[in-house]
Structure formats: C-alpha cells, structure tokens
Amino acid sequence: MRKAAITRNTTETSIKVAVDLDGSGKYAVKTGVGFLDHMLEQLSRHSLMDLEVEAKGDLHIDAHHTTEDVGIAIGQAVAQALGDRKGIHRYGSAYVPMDEALTRVALDLSNRPYLIWKVRFGRDKLGTMDTELFKEWFQAFAQAAGATLHVESLYGDNDHHIVESCFKALARSLRDAVEIDPRKADAVPSTKGTLGGSL
C-alpha cells in the first residue's frame, strides 16, 4: 500500500499529513486558512489521492509559514509513499479549464526538484490568503516531493478560477504520474536505474 504519514513540528507550525496514493479522493483538511483548505480538497478529489491535513500555525502573523509548511509536509508524504518510485509512470501533464481560465501543468517525479511558475494574479488576496503564497506552496511541494513541476496560467481574468485550475491541473498530472505502469511495474522509470541526481 502506497501510504505515508508525516508529522512536522517547528516553532511556527505543527502539521500532521497522511496520504494514500491509491485512494479514491477522500479528504479531511483543516489548516486554518479557508482558501488553502479549498485548494487541497481539490487536489485530493481530482488526483484520487486520499489526503488528511491538520495544521496549526502562527496565523496571527500571516499565512506564510502555514502555507509553506503544509506544502512541505504533503510533498514529503508523497515522496515517502512513492518509495523507490519503481513502476510509476513518472510523467504527467494536464490542461485544466475553469470558466475563462486555462492552466497547463507538466510534472516529472524525477526526484530532481524544480519549479517553473508562470502565473500572475490581479489582486493581492483571495479570502484572507495572499495570492503570492500560492507560488510558495507549489515551490515547497515540488522541493519536498522531488518533482520537476511546470505551472503556467495560459489565460484567465478571475484569480479564484486561475489558482483553482492550477491545483486541479496539478492533481490530474499527479494522478497520471504516480500510476503504476503494468508493462514495467518492476523497474524504476529511468535508464540510470534510479531517480535523482544531476544527470
């Protein structure tokens, strides 16, 4: 079973995360940041990854530490659940529209973390959440999950639609990338025989 549980405690946040890569998209998410909860629920539902998140952070300052550390913890849990990454498809990509907005995500679970983020917002906040924090979440997730992740908003006017299409496109890409390839379930998807490193 490709499951993992992570506990992350710092002076700024206390976070518990559990994932099941072979789930059905069930979620229980409570971060204290309403809009982030909504996005993580979308991530779970559309990736079919079961996700539990319980976070307590220094929200009296702002949502930065909570957002970043939740991204780290979810990424760590995904990486742990993947193990040696044997048999996975490794790659995933998706175009996801939401009304007038369209986002493209390409994902490689290469164990070489990298983020390309080409997303712009027209306002500073969605709900109580600073829009600049979405990049921080994706950066933290990519780094901790060992993912090369390209996120590009192709167009859109409504910031809610733009960011939601980003999370849904990540979800669909992740769903494909973690899937086991029955034709090569016994092998790591790399000519090197391992994933990671600089080559």
Image (cartoon, helix red, strand yellow):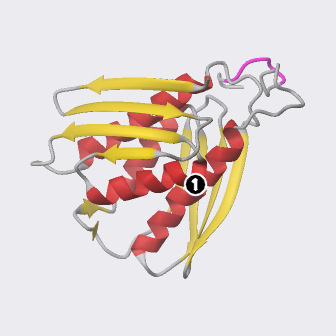
What residue is drawn where x is 53% and y is 53%? 45
What residue is drawn where x is 63% and y is 53%? 172
Residue 46 in percent (x, y) is at 57, 54
In the picture, measured across the screen, residue 107 lies left or right of residue 9, that is: right
Vertical side of 46 occupied by 184: above or below: above
> Residue most toward the left?
60
Answer whether residue 144 is visible to the viewer in this image: no
Q: Quadrant of the N terminus?
A: top right
Secondary structure mostly seen in magenta is: loop
Residue 194 on the magenta segment: yes
In the picture, measured across the screen, residue 113 lies left or right of residue 72, that is: right
- Where residue 84 sits, quadrant-wise, is top right
Neighbours of disc 1 within 10 Å: few (<14), some (14-19), many (20+): many
What residue is drawn where x is 73% and y is 18%? 194
In the picture, measured across the screen, residue 52 lies left or right of residue 25, that is: left
SS for callout 1 = helix
What residue is drawn where x is 65% and y is 45%? 175
| The magenta segment | 191-195
Residue 132 on the magenta segment: no
Residue 15 in percent (x, y) is at 29, 32
Vertical side of 145 occupied by 165: above or below: below
Residue 199 vs residue 192, the one in the foreground: 192
Vertical side of 199 occupied by 70: above or below: below
Q: Amino acid at mark 1?
A: His
- Where residue 177 sits, quadrant-wise, is top right
Vertical side of 67 occupied by 77: above or below: above
Answer whether residue 105 is visible to the viewer in this image: yes
Residue 198 in percent (x, y) is at 66, 25
- The residue singled out by tag 1 in the image is 46
Q: Quadrant of the C terminus?
A: top right
